[in-house]
Each structure stands twice: as C-alpha cells, then as structure tokens.
Image (tube, rainbow, N blue to C red):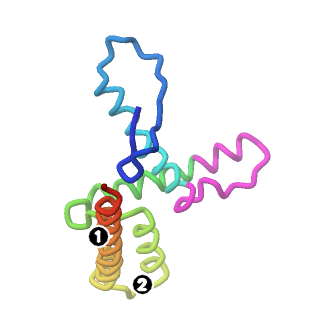
Amino acid sequence: MRREIGSPHEIKYSLSNAPEAKLIERLAFMQAQRYWVEHALRNAKSEAGMADYQLRLRQGWHHHMARVMPAMLFMFEVRREHKEDLSLLSCHDVVEVLRVLLPKANATYEEVFAQVEERHRRRQASIASAYAKQLRNRQYSRP
C-alpha cells in the first residue's frame, strides 16, 4: 500500500506473487522503479518517435524500434555524462540542442550552453514554485 504525499486520502495498492521471505523494502523499491520505466517510455514516444510508426508488418516495426533504441541510448548517455553540471538536462533538452546545432554550423558551444542554462533556470523556478504551492496547500489543509 502507498499513500500519496499531496493527497492523503488516496491510497494505491499493489499485488505481488513474491515469496513471503522477500523483504518488504525490496518490494517497495521495485514498485517505485515503475515510475522511471514509464518516464523512459514517455520520453521515447515524445522525443525519439517511438509512437510515430505507421507500419503493417512486424519487420517494419522492428526496424523502427531498432532506430528508436539507439537514439534513446544516445540521449541517456548525454544526460549521464553531463549530470554533474546540468542536473536538469532532459531528453527534450538534448533534442533541442541537436535541432540548433545540426542545421547551424556556426552555432558555438557557448551559445547552445547558454540556451540550455536558461531553460534550466526556468525549469528550476517552476519546480520551486510547485514545491512552495504544495507546502502552502499542506499547511492550509491541516486542522
């Protein structure tokens, strides 16, 4: 069972066929990993075109997926490589950088990096605003 922080009345249940000897912490960890799998699939569909196929045969679908997966691996590797200095780097950021760099041979690294930093400043402000709103809502909902 899991209760959401923002909505204490909403409880989510998960069923498992794991043996009783399995540690509850391990089961909870595995359930929490579901978010990251769904997040990766959402990125693959929106940024790498995983859902953009119009094929009728299985072979064409396999060809399409064989092109989507290396694209996702590339985005993952870029994000992993830059996670120290660009902690908010997303798949969408990588795609946007490529859209800027590939057509323009004269775009400098500094220009592109400045664009990414600006996007991250706006994203961090949005995250901070959302947390502040959650905190205010929790304070008002307490008796």
Q: Earlier in the sequence, mark 2 or mark 1?
A: 2
Q: Residue at x 44, y 40 (%)?
A: 34
Q: Label for residue 128?
A: 1
Label 2 vs label 1: CA separation?
A: 36 Å
Q: Amino acid at mark 1?
A: Ala
* Residue 9 drawn at (x, y percent): 44, 44
Judge the density around disc 2: few (<14), some (14-19), many (≥20) Cα neighbours within 10 Å: few
Residue 99 drawn above or below residue 6: below
Q: Nearer the viewer, residue 119 or 35?
A: 35
Q: Quadrant of residue 37?
A: top left
* Residue 92 drawn at (x, y percent): 45, 67
Residue 15 drawn above or below residue 39: above
Foreground mark, 2 or 1? Answer: 1
Q: Residue at x 59, y 47 (%)?
A: 65
Judge the density around disc 1: few (<14), some (14-19), many (≥20) Cα neighbours within 10 Å: few
Callout 2 touching callout 1 (CB < 8 Å): no
Tell me the magenta residue range: 45-65
* Residue 57 drawn at (x, y percent): 77, 43
Q: Label for residue 105?
A: 2
* Residue 112 drawn at (x, y percent): 34, 80
Q: Residue at x 35, y 77 (%)?
A: 119
Q: Quadrant of residue 51?
A: bottom right
Q: Amino acid at mark 2?
A: Ala
